[in-house]
Structures are given as structure tokens and as C-alpha cells.
Image: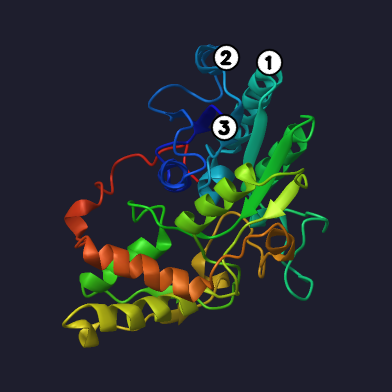
């Protein structure tokens, strides 16, 4: 199988490249990753030329403009990247009769009255933000393909840039001696990109048909404040002087001045994924695993790209 991967330099794209190479079923599959450094995903001719050159069997579309307030401030850019870009990818899949795996978000739900156990794949979306609307529009566009899989996930961490990875930012702020203010009244499923990537590889290699949409998140529900508490506790056991680390301060979502609306509780149900033979670990275990990985690689502020560099558009 020839895998074409958009957003290859992002958190999930990087994890997917590693997971495909590590799995014995997919280690020999050719993988071609592209990012905004190669071309603009909204440029139809560039997408066509790139996919024609590679002729993929499967396209994994992780590229997106995912900064919620930036989408709210510039909806034209959000529409261009998240909708027009997805439309171009769908056209390429039709041309090559390729399967498409589309990465969507828990922000397609409003979070006002989540069902017990979290939102299921068949529950009615109702996004509150431009970002959520564009991801839902992408789902609708993808649905015209005869062979597609929409993977909804949430609150991703596991990257190398503290501007787009909240858990990494927490770790680095802790090492700088800074106390984090974290929202305590918004809830979802913090999810490790390494776990999502392994689940996607499992779904790609699993025999038999797949449902059109699958929720892929670490188990359990948390606020970012709860995540921060786990990060600090983990670091206190992982580093020699960890007892000096400061616990996070609880703040409210209403006091953050966000431009785009956020769901109050967008937790996703993963019973369908479990029925397909894959269960992700609890979010707290995943956070501890990522913290241990960071400590082993000796993270420092110097390892993070400068704050004044423009964030990449094609990042999940």
C-alpha cells in the first residue's frame, strides 16, 4: 500500500510516519509525506501534481488550520485550508481510487449536554466555532468518497512545539519555574499522538470493512487543570529537584477571552474503536509516558522554535 500523508511535519503526521515504520505490517509500505513547506494544500494544481506523481492507495489527511482563535479571526484562511484543501484531497482520491483517512475533531460538538460515556459517532454535531464548522464541512466533503474513514480525536499532545502542544508547554514552563494557569471547567479527552497513530495503523491493517467514522482518543475525561496536576506529579518523580515544581492555578474558560466558542464537555466515546479491536490507555498514563519521554530527551527552552516564528498552517 502506498501512503500519501498531508501535514507530515505536524504532531500527528510525525507520529504516523513513526508508527507506520514501526509496525511489521506496514514497515515496507512506501510513505510520501508533504507539508506546507512543499505546497499550499488549497492549491488544486499543486495537490494534483503531487498525488499524480506518487499515485497513492491511501491518503491520510492530517493537514489543517487548527488554532481555534486564529480561525475565528481569519475565517477565509480557515475555509481555504480546512475546506478547500480537503476538497482538493478528495478530488485526488477520486482520481486514484484511493482510500481517504480524514482527521476531524471533538469540536464538531457543542459540548452542552454530552451523553453519558461521551459523544458517539452517530450523535448530531453542532459546532460553536469557525474551526469546528470547517472540520464538520470537511467530514461532509469526505463522505462523498466510496472508501473513506473519518477519525475524530481531541486535545492532542506529543509534539515538539510548545505553541501547539499544551502538555509540552506545561513541562517546559515547569522547568522554567513558571506557574501555569489552566482551565478547570472545560473537559474532553487529552490524547497522545503516538496512541492515535498506532490506532490508525491498526484500522488500516484490520481485515474487513470499517464504519465511516471512528472516535480515537485516550480513555477518560479531564480538564487542562487536571492534566497540569498529572504533569507536575509526574515530573516530581522523574527529575531530581522535582519537589520544587509549582502546581497549576485553576482558571475559568470564561475568563480567557477566547474569540471562538469552545464546547464545555466534548468527551468522545470509544466503544466502537474497542469493538474494532483497539483500546487506548487512560489519558493520565499517556501524559506520564510523554513526560518520561521528554525527560529522557532532556527538554529545554532552547529546543523549542522561537515564539515569533509564524505557526505552520498544516498542523493537527
- Above or below residue 311? Residue 216 is below
Q: Dot 3: what SS?
A: helix
> Mark 3 — residue?
81
Residues 283 and 253: in front is 283
As measured in the structure, the alpha-carbon distance from the residue carrying label 2 to the one carrying label 3 is 16 Å
Labelled pair 1, 2 in contact (Cβ < 8 Å): yes
x 60%, y 30%: residue: 58
- Is 157 situated left or right of 121 in this image? left
Q: In the drawing, what numbered circle is on residue 48?
A: 2
For this orientation, the residue located farthest to the bottom is: 243
Q: Is residue 88 in view from this perspective?
A: yes
As measured in the structure, the alpha-carbon distance from the residue carrying label 1 to the one carrying label 2 is 9 Å
Which label sits in the foreground, 2 or 3? Answer: 2
Which is more N-terminal, label 3 or label 1? 3
List x then y, in percent, for residue 15: 43, 48
Neighbourhood count class around disc 3 (C-alpha, 10 Å): few under 14, some 14–19, many 20 upward? many
> Mark 1 — residue?
95
Amino acid at each position: 500500500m502506498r501512503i500519501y500523508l498531508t501535514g507530515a511535519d505536524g504532531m500527528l503526521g510525525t507520529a504516523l510516519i513513526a508508527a507506520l515504520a514501526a509496525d511489521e505490517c506496514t514497515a515496507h509500505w512506501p510513505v510520501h509525506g508533504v507539508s506546507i513547506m512543499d505546497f499550499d494544500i488549497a492549491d488544486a494544481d499543486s495537490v494534483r501534481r503531487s498525488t499524480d506523481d506518487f499515485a497513492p492507495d491511501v491518503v491520510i489527511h492530517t493537514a489543517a488550520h487548527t488554532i481555534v482563535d486564529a480561525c475565528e479571526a481569519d475565517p477565509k484562511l480557515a475555509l481555504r485550508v480546512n475546506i478547500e484543501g480537503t476538497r482538493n484531497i478528495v478530488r485526488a482520491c477520486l482520481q486514484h481510487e484511493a482510500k481517504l483517512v480524514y482527521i476531524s475533531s471533538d469540536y464538531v460538538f457543542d459540548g452542552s449536554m454530552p451523553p453519558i460515556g461521551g459523544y458517539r459517532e452517530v450523535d448530531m454535531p453542532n459546532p460553536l466555532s469557525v474551526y469546528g464548522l470547517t472540520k464538520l464541512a470537511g467530514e461532509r466533503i469526505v463522505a462523498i468518497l466510496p472508501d473513506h474513514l473519518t477519525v475524530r480525536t481531541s486535545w492532542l499532545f506529543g509534539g515538539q512545539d510548545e505553541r501547539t502542544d499544551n502538555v509540552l508547554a506545561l513541562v517546559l514552563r515547569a522547568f522554567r519555574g513558571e506557574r501555569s494557569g489552566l482551565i478547570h471547567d472545560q473537559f474532553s479527552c487529552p490524547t497522545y499522538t503516538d496512541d492515535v497513530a498506532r490506532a490508525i495503523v491498526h484500522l488500516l491493517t484490520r481485515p474487513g470493512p470499517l464504519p465511516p467514522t471512528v472516535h480515537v482518543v485516550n480513555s477518560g475525561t479531564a480538564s487542562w487543570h487536571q492534566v497540569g496536576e498529572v504533569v507536575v506529579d509526574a515530573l516530581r518523580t522523574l527529575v531530581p529537584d522535582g519537589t520544587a515544581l509549582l502546581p497549576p492555578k485553576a482558571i475559568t474558560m470564561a475568563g480567557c477571552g477566547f474569540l471562538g466558542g469552545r464546547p464545555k464537555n466534548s468527551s468522545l466515546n470509544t466503544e466502537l474503536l474497542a469493538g474494532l479491536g483497539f483500546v487506548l490507555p487512560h489519558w493520565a498514563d499517556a501524559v506520564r509516558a510523554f513526560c518520561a519521554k521528554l525527560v529522557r530527551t532532556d527538554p529545554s527552552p532552547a529546543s523549542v522554535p522561537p515564539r515569533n516564528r509564524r505557526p505552520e498552517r498544516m498542523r493537527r
